[in-house]
Amino acid sequence: MVIQKKEKTSLTSRQAKEKKEPKEKKVKEDKFEIKIEEMTEKGVHLGHKISKLHPKMADFVVGIRNTVHIIDLKKTATCLKKALNFISELSEKGEKMLLVGTKPPLRDLVEETARDCNLPYVSCRWLGGTFSNFKVISKRAKYYNDLKKEKTEGGFDKFSKKERQQKEKELKELEKKFEGIKDLQELPKAVFICDVKTDKLALKEAVMKGVKVIAIVDTNVDPSLVDYPIPANDDAISSVKYILEKVKEVIKKSKIQNPNAK
């Protein structure tokens, strides 16, 4: 009889814990202020033309306006809160997240957000092997850092005019490729992709290496490929900026609460 009672107590305790955890998670997610009206103003709800709908995005669509699918912003808010909660946890632990956005209109926004949050970033072109062949990429990044240091310390002065020009040209090209990841010493724990279609190689390599993926998913992409999909317009700068501003708020708040985080 005693043994049966212990088993029952253990089971009850476990069940209570399982019921409690989702509530605690919901409380965490509720700390993020996401307003439907604000998202509507920023055009977050505007998807692609109905002919481009990915079947797996159908659940995130609430209607059609002028042949364009309208994203259900209530679901966007729920997904965004989950993503922000994950980013907050990463930041509190001092874990790295790589920000990726190589679509030309988004480059300045991506770089600005990355600098403000002290995040590594890729804004020009995703280099094949950035994740899948990280050791080689790291060596090239180190070479870029060394070359940059050499110039800063006046090391280029010893070269002829022609040689200096060649060095300057090489440095400029390396800057486009490696400036955002020059301090990345190991694979990040997560990658945030602003446009899954444009940066599909980044998504592929992240999945291959087990790096968690947070991404804005428009109505023309498969959300099941992403760990934390955020259904939203990935073409309008105002939409992407709204989401990145939320990311910035979360990271800055996490760093204030945990100043010892990297």
Image (cartoon, grey):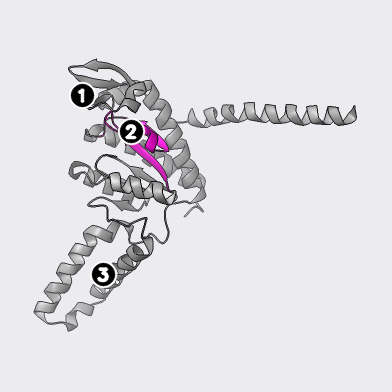
**Magenta region:** 211-234
Residue at the (77%, 31%) spot, across then down: 10
| Residue 121 visible here | yes
Q: Left of 144 or right of it: where is 190?
A: right
Q: Position of residue 95 (x, y in %)?
A: 47, 51
Q: Mark 3, residues whose alpha carbon is within 10 Å: few (<14), some, or many (≥20)?
A: some
* Mark toward the viewer: 1 or 3: 1
Q: Left of 58 or right of it: where is 251?
A: right
* Sequence-earlier tag: 1 or 2: 1
- Please identify the quadrant where the N terminus is shown: top right
Front one among 38 and 169: 169
Which mark is on residue 148? 3
* Sequence-earlier tag: 2 or 3: 3
Distance CA(mark 1)–CA(mark 2): 15 Å
Distance CA(mark 1)–CA(mark 3): 48 Å
Query: Label 3 is placed on what type of residue?
Result: Lys
Front one among 120 and 12: 12
Q: Is residue 226 above or below residue 139?
A: above
Rendered image quadrant of residue 229: top left
Front one among 182 and 227: 227
Q: Position of residue 41 (x, y in %)?
A: 26, 24
Residue at the (35%, 50%) spot, across then down: 205
Tell me the residue that label 2 is attached to: 222
The reply to whether the C-beta atoms of the residues labelled 1 and 2 are less than 8 Å apart is no
Query: Label 2 is placed on what type of residue?
Result: Asp
Q: Mark 1, residues whose alpha carbon is within 10 Å: few (<14), some, or many (≥20)?
A: few
Residue at the (64%, 29%) spot, across then down: 18
Mark 2 residue element? loop
| Furthest-right residue in this view | 1
